[in-house]
Amino acid sequence: MTNSKTGELEESYILSDFYLSREFTDGELRLLIDSLLFSRHIPYSRCGNW
């Protein structure tokens, strides 16, 4: 890829296939669950089918 200001060739790359692995606290899990249950965009019938 060429730099538009200097005209020099630059390397570019995209990071993919990585994820963050961590433990959630009880409060964070409760927030996620409540967000699903009270969302206006996700039907209630879809929130409890796990």
Image: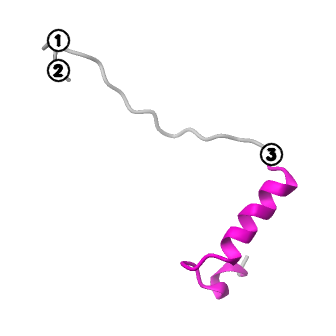
The part of the image, by quadrant, that contains residue 8 is top left
Q: How many marks?
A: 3
Q: Which residue is mark 1?
A: 8
Q: Residue at x 19, y 19 (%)?
A: 3
Q: Of helix, strand and loop, which one carries label 2?
A: loop
Q: Position of residue 28 (x, y in %)?
A: 78, 55
Q: Amino acid at mark 2?
A: Thr
Q: Position of residue 14 (x, y in %)?
A: 39, 33
In front here: 11 or 37? 37
Classify 34 as above or below 42.
above
In front here: 27 or 50? 27
Dot 1 or dot 2, earlier in sequence: 2
Q: Which mark is residue 2?
A: 2
Q: Position of residue 21 (x, y in %)?
A: 71, 41
Q: Residue at x 12, y 14 (%)?
A: 7
Q: Is residue 47 magenta?
A: yes
Marks 3 and 2, how far apart in space?
Answer: 42 Å
Q: Which residues are magenta?
A: 24-48
Q: Would you say the residues marked 1 and 2 are in contact, meaning their CB atoms lie under 8 Å apart?
A: yes
Q: Amino acid at mark 1?
A: Glu
Marks 3 and 1, how far apart in space?
Answer: 44 Å
Q: Which residue is mark 3?
A: 23
Q: Would you say the residues marked 3 and 2 are in contact, meaning their CB atoms lie under 8 Å apart?
A: no
Marks 1 and 2, how far apart in space?
Answer: 6 Å
Q: Main secondary structure of the magenta part?
A: helix
